[in-house]
Image (cartoon, helix red, strand yellow):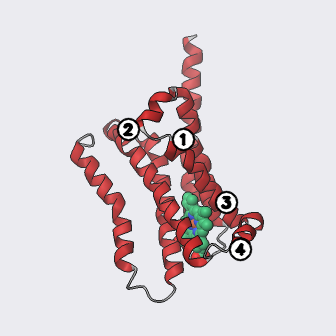
Amino acid sequence: MLKSRWTYYLVFLACLMPLGYLAWMWPQVRINRIEYVARFTGDWTIGFLMASLAITPLRRIPWLNGLIAFRRTIGLFAFFYGLLHAFHYYQFDVQWNWDIMKEDLTIRRFFIAGMAALLLMLPLAVTSTNWAIRKMDGKRWQNLHRLAYLAGIAGVAHYLWQGKAATMYPLIYALLLTLLLGVRVMLYIQKSRRQMSVR
Ligand code: HEM
């Protein structure tokens, strides 16, 4: 079922739903619209990024193996919402004021981490085409795509450094990321042990 073409279209459509919802809400939000959009797009960027990272361990569960078919799409949507999030900030909040941009990106760790997360996702998006996967050898491609974890760390740091102590969500994401990294390390250790015992 997970491998059917229709499921793929459904997932693609589901990934577009936040954008549709935002377009629908846009004229209705009249107070603090800039903050509303920044938070909405930020939440979906981190959500998609975490979902794409979660697929790697989840696909080990036999009946969830088909999830792998959606990893690339979900990862690309993380980048898309991240771009929208950053573009919206620069266009509507900062209005491309170079002095503010420079100050943000040199002295404010919150913005430095956000930009780092976005830039770390860029090579992943660029090399996600079938052509790039064919051109790069499997090992190199896999190593490059581990940058997704660094993007996750930078994204969570950005969220934590937002400085709104009243919300638990950044901590929940930090916990989830730690769990995903932990599983990854465990799988790596297991694999190395298996290889050692074969030799
Ligand atoms: C150039 C890159 C980025 C810029 C300039 C930027 C800027 C911002 C701004 C201005 C806010 C709103 C802060 C507030 O209302 O107090 C925000 C919030 C947020 N951003 Fe970013 N961001 C960037 C990249 C990212 C990336 C790549 C992610 C995810 C991986 C991300 C995730 C978030 C989250 C989760 C929030 C908090 C949303 C909430 O409060 O519910 N941001 N960001």
The kind of secondary structure element at disc 4 is: helix
> Is 48 situated left or right of 24 in this image?
right
Spatial separation of the CA atoms under disc 1 and disc 4: 40 Å
Residue occupying the point 21% across, 48% down: 6
Give the residue type at disc 2.
Answer: Ile
Tags 1 and 4 touching, CB below 8 Å = no
Give the residue type at disc 1.
Answer: Val
Q: Nearer the viewer, mark 3 or mark 4?
A: 4
Looking at the image, residue 52 lies above or below residue 98: above
Looking at the image, residue 77 lies above or below residue 129: below
> Is 167 situated left or right of 1 in this image?
right
Q: Position of residue 190 (x, y in %)?
A: 55, 28
Q: Which residue is mark 3?
A: 113
Quarter holding residue 90: bottom right
Are there few (<14), some (14-19), or many (20+) residues within 10 Å of tag 2? few
Q: Is mark 3 within 8 Å of ligand 1?
A: yes
Q: Which residue is mark 2?
A: 61
Q: Position of residue 192 (x, y in %)?
A: 59, 24
Q: Position of residue 3 (x, y in %)?
A: 26, 40
Tags 3 and 1 touching, CB below 8 Å = no
| Farthest residue, direction top | 199
Q: Which residue is mark 4?
A: 100
Residue occupying the point 55% across, 50% down: 121
